[in-house]
Image: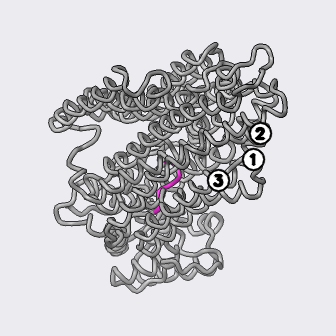
């Protein structure tokens, strides 16, 4: 690798977004956040509206497909959006994704029956997959790597926020407007996002050619669809022994054969089969599948329990769900940070799956007479278990693979969680439907029902419960309660399997560059789709900003073998990068005491490292030589964070990334050598 001066390195690789004004970048980021908000909110806002939707449209047995159709479509579409964005430009595709999502939202809002709603939810999911992956990718086009972690953290915060706000907003719309506004609300937000994107987002079309794995994507989507259809229709629409159900199962298994053949030959497979030779990846994929299964299955059916059995309003059902969301977010954030800082992770998948199983058993004990306090504790325990394991699974996978496979391994692990979510909602729905109808018939045996009320109407429309006499209603409510809570008991064996598999995970030394993933990699039902370079850029930007600013310059000055004050090193790098510095302007702009700047200027001038022209300080030849030493020292300190990825045979894009980050950080305002008097010893 040929050495370049810091100035040359930066000139050769201008930071993305370097010529854009801060206001333009903020507006563009705001529009991208709105796009992400649409997709993230749609995963949670629908749950509290589902009981009302099925009451209005009928077909309680198809409730699960309102969620499953969206998940399957977005999961299948996510990798395609990412590759197409690289190949044809992300701005137009992002606008297309918003357009598809908005059309799907409007059609969902005007749906007249369940088949229509399910079909339109699938269309909405196709657009939602694009919103997820493209909004995160565009951040990389307009934001320098040193700031990427901070901005991507904002997108993660959107997911955390929608986990809380989604159920509440869904309930509010149902109570005060209509369930259709759960979908209509996307329209004004999406139109604003489209307008801002069109006006302020100007990114060059960098065409990255890809061999897009269309056959592999289609085949894995068909496999998942066949198996999900089998589990959702079996015992509900068709007997388990019927040719339709057996045929779906056989077809799903048979389609795996061409999928494996296609993936072996694909230049860029959607799911590289070589990953499964990595034991840690395989174990984490299975555990993630089970976690997604339990998490999204329960989040779909708990609002039904609250609204039908407990009789609370949709808004209050969203409030009752908050302990579970709180437990999940608290535990996932804490576990991710603890693992990142201590390097010990094996305890969390084991304890998380164990607590998750305890939570499922507690949810199975719920009944109509259960108090709000007891319910909240049950919800919190279950959320705590999910949170303990979700963040850590992504960390473990990222730690176990080579740099070249970092991106595909992360997307692969989250892909299996997404597929697990689809299966969870589907299987939970089948169990619920299979248990509900016979229990309602038993509860009504020998009872004279009011006109227009029958066991079939009570299982199709929960609102028919209000027309039952009080003496009869209790038995039907118990049937609903037992049928819903049974699904949690049936999820216990899967949770126990995850617990046993977690014991097989080996604890390996944690790479320094593996940091806690943001919520978009943990909470979202969509798989993550980012390249290895994107993942490392995010991690290094987070680690670089975590270092104490004064300590950075103390460290690299010592490493370079120079005897300079930290502020003098910072000023010398800044002068070399920009060609000059003006101390009076720095004193106004920088968070550095004037006497510190004055001492730095005096030291640089006394050693002949800068010369003065009016108010400007220009680096001398010796100053540029020492600036190069400082630059290399900073570059080496960043490279050390990559650990065993920084090997002699490392990919060239890692060299470029480290040089780019180093050029942006050295002498920048983002790394001032003084913290305004606040102690910072994190380096």
Image side of residue 448 versus residue 198, left or right: right
Q: Earlier in the sequence, mark 2 or mark 3?
A: 2
Which of label 1 and label 3 is nearer to you? 3
Relative to 395, residue 458 above or below: above
**Bounds of the magenta segment:** 516-520
Q: Position of residue 101 (x, y in %)?
A: 54, 25
Residue 435 covered by magenta stretch: no
Q: How many other residues sit within 10 Å of disc 2, few (<14), some (14-19) or many (≥20)?
A: many
Q: Position of residue 329 (x, y in %)?
A: 60, 57
Q: Residue at x 66, y 57 (%)?
A: 378
Residue with the mark numbered 1: 319
Q: Secondary structure at mark 1?
A: helix
Front residue of this view, candidates 413 and 585: 413
Q: Position of residue 318 (x, y in %)?
A: 72, 43
Relative to 295, residue 309 above or below: above
Q: Earlier in the sequence, mark 1 or mark 3?
A: 1
- Farthest residue to the bottom: give it: 563
Residue with the mark numbered 2: 315
Q: Residue at x 34, y 25 (%)?
A: 248
Front residue of this view, candidates 145 and 121: 121
Label 2 with label 1: CB-CB less than 8 Å: yes
Image side of residue 275 versus residue 603, left or right: left
Q: Position of residue 645 (x, y in %)?
A: 26, 64
Q: Where residue 365 is drawn, which disc sits there?
A: 3
Q: Residue at x 58, y 60 (%)?
A: 384
């Amino acid at each position: 690798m040929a050495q370049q001066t810091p100035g040359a390195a930066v000139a050769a690789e201008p930071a993305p977004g370097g010529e854009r004004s801060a206001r333009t970048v903020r507006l563009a980021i705001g529009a991208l956040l709105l796009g992400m908000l649409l997709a993230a909110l749609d995963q949670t806002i629908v749950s509290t509206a589902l009981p009302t939707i099925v009451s209005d449209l009928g077909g309680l047995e198809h409730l699960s497909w309102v969620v499953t159709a969206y998940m399957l479509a977005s999961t299948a579409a996510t990798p395609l959006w990412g590759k197409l964005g690289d190949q044809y430009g992300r701005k137009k595709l992002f606008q297309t994704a918003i357009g598809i999502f908005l059309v799907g939202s409007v059609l969902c809002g005007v749906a007249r029956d369940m088949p229509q709603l399910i079909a339109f939810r699938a269309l909405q999911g196709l657009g939602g997959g694009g919103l997820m992956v493209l909004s995160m990718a565009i951040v990389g086009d307009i934001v320098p790597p040193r700031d990427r972690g901070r901005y991507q953290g904002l997108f993660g915060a959107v997911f955390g926020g929608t986990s809380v706000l989604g159920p509440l907003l869904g309930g509010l719309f149902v109570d005060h407007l209509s369930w259709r506004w759960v979908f209509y609300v996307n329209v004004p937000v999406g139109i604003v996002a489209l307008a801002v994107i069109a006006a302020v987002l100007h990114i060059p079309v960098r065409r990255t050619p890809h061999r897009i794995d269309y056959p592999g994507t289609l085949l894995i989507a068909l496999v998942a669809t066949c198996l999900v259809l089998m589990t959702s229709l079996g015992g509900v629409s068709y007997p388990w022994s019927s040719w339709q159900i057996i045929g779906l199962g056989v077809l799903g298994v048979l389609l795996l054969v061409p999928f494996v053949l296609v993936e072996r030959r694909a230049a860029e497979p959607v799911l590289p089969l070589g990953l499964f030779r990595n034991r840690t990846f395989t174990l984490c994929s299975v555990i993630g599948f089970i976690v997604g299964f339990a998490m999204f299955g329960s989040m779909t059916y708990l609002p039904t329990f609250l609204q039908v059995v407990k009789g609370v309003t949709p808004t209050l059902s969203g409030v009752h769900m908050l302990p579970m969301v709180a437990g999940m977010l608290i535990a996932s954030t804490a576990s991710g940070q603890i693992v990142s800082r201590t390097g010990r992770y094996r305890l969390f998948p084991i304890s998380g799956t164990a607590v998750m199983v305890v939570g499922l058993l507690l949810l199975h004990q719920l009944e109509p007479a259960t108090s709000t306090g007891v319910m909240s504790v049950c919800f919190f325990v279950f959320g705590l278990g999910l949170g303990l394991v979700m963040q850590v699974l992504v960390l473990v996978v990222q730690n176990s693979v080579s740099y070249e496979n970092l991106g595909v391994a992360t997307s692969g692990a989250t892909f299996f969680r997404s597929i697990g979510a689809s299966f969870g909602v589907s299987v939970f729905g089948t169990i619920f439907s299979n248990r509900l109808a016979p229990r309602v018939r038993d509860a009504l045996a020998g009872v004279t029902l009011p006109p227009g009320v029958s066991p079939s109407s009570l299982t199709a429309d929960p609102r028919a419960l209000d027309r039952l006499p009080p003496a009869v209603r209790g038995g039907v409510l118990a049937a609903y309660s037992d049928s819903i809570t049974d699904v949690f008991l049936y999820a216990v064996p899967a949770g126990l399997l995850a617990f046993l598999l977690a014991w097989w995970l080996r604890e390996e030394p944690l790479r320094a560059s593996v940091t806690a993933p943001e919520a978009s990699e943990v909470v979202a039902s969509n798989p993550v789709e980012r390249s290895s370079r994107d993942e490392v850029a995010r991690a290094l930007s987070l680690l670089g900003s975590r270092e104490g600013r004064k300590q950075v310059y103390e460290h690299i000055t010592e490493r370079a073998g120079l005897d300079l004050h930290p502020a003098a090193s910072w000023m010398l790098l800044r002068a070399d990068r920009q060609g000059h510095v003006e101390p009076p302007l720095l004193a106004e702009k920088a968070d550095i005491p004037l006497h510190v700047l004055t001492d730095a200027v005096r030291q640089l001038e006394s050693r002949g490292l800068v010369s003065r022209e009016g108010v400007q300080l220009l680096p001398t030849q010796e100053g540029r030589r020492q600036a190069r030493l400082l630059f290399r020292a900073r570059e080496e300190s960043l490279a050390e964070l990559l650990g065993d990825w920084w090997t002699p045979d490392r990919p060239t894009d890692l060299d470029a990334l480290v040089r780019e980050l180093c050029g942006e950080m050295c002498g920048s305002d983002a790394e001032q050598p003084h913290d305004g008097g606040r102690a910072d010893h994190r380096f």
